[in-house]
Amino acid sequence: MFFVYVILSKKDSRFYIGFSEDVNGRLKDHNDGKVASTKNRRPFELIYYEAYINKKDAEGREKFLKSGGGHNFLRKQLRNYFTEVHLNQI
């Protein structure tokens, strides 16, 4: 399985969108400071993920979610979550 995931930084309330074969292990890597692009934004919470059988499909979805259209999709998909935590960004 291949996963596209969204994690929330509890430090700055910003999001990170990534791709991995092991979403729980990758979240641990982020929280342990092993990912250079996120190590100063720890800790993180997993707030969304999608699973794919095909690696190229997952990579394509990650690319889309990082785009403006993908951000709009996530805002709609996670609207209840954003309301609960009073966040309006992604």
Image: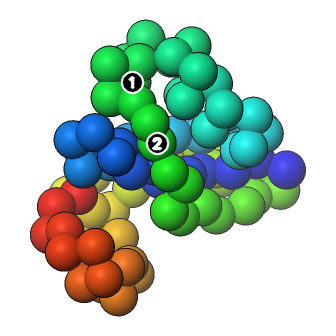
Q: Residue at x 73, y 44 (%)?
A: 24
Q: Secondary structure at mark 2?
A: strand
Left or right relative to 66: residue 4: right
- Residue 60 seen anywhere in this rendered image of the structure: no
Left-right relation of 70 to 89: right
Badge 2: how crowded within 10 Å, few (<14), some, or many (20+)? many
Crowd band around label 1 with a 10 angstrom C-alpha radius: few (<14), some (14–19), many (20+)? some
**Kind of residue at badge 1:** Thr
Q: Amino acid at mark 2?
A: Phe
The count of marks equals 2
Position in image of residue 38 (x %, y %): 39, 24
Which residue is more in the foreground, 49 or 47? 47
Q: Position of residue 53 (x, y in %)?
A: 83, 56
Q: CA distance from mark 2 to mark 1?
A: 9 Å
Residue 63 occupies which quadrant of the picture?
Answer: top left
Q: Is residue 34 left or right of residue 51?
A: left
In this view, the residue in front, 65 or 37, is 37
What residue lies at 44% left-to-right and 36% top-to-bottom?
A: 43
Residue 61 picture location, percent across and down: 52, 55
* Residue carrying label 2: 44
State if disc 1 and disc 2 touch (CB < 8 Å).
yes
Quarter of the image where one finds residue 78: bottom left
Name the mark on residue 72: none
Task: Classify mark 1: helix, strand or loop.
Answer: loop
- The residue identified by callout 1 is 38
Marked residue nearer the N-terminal end (2 or 1): 1
Question: Which residue lies at the image location 66% right of the left edge and 32% below the top edge?
Answer: 28
Query: Which residue is outermost to the left?
Result: 88
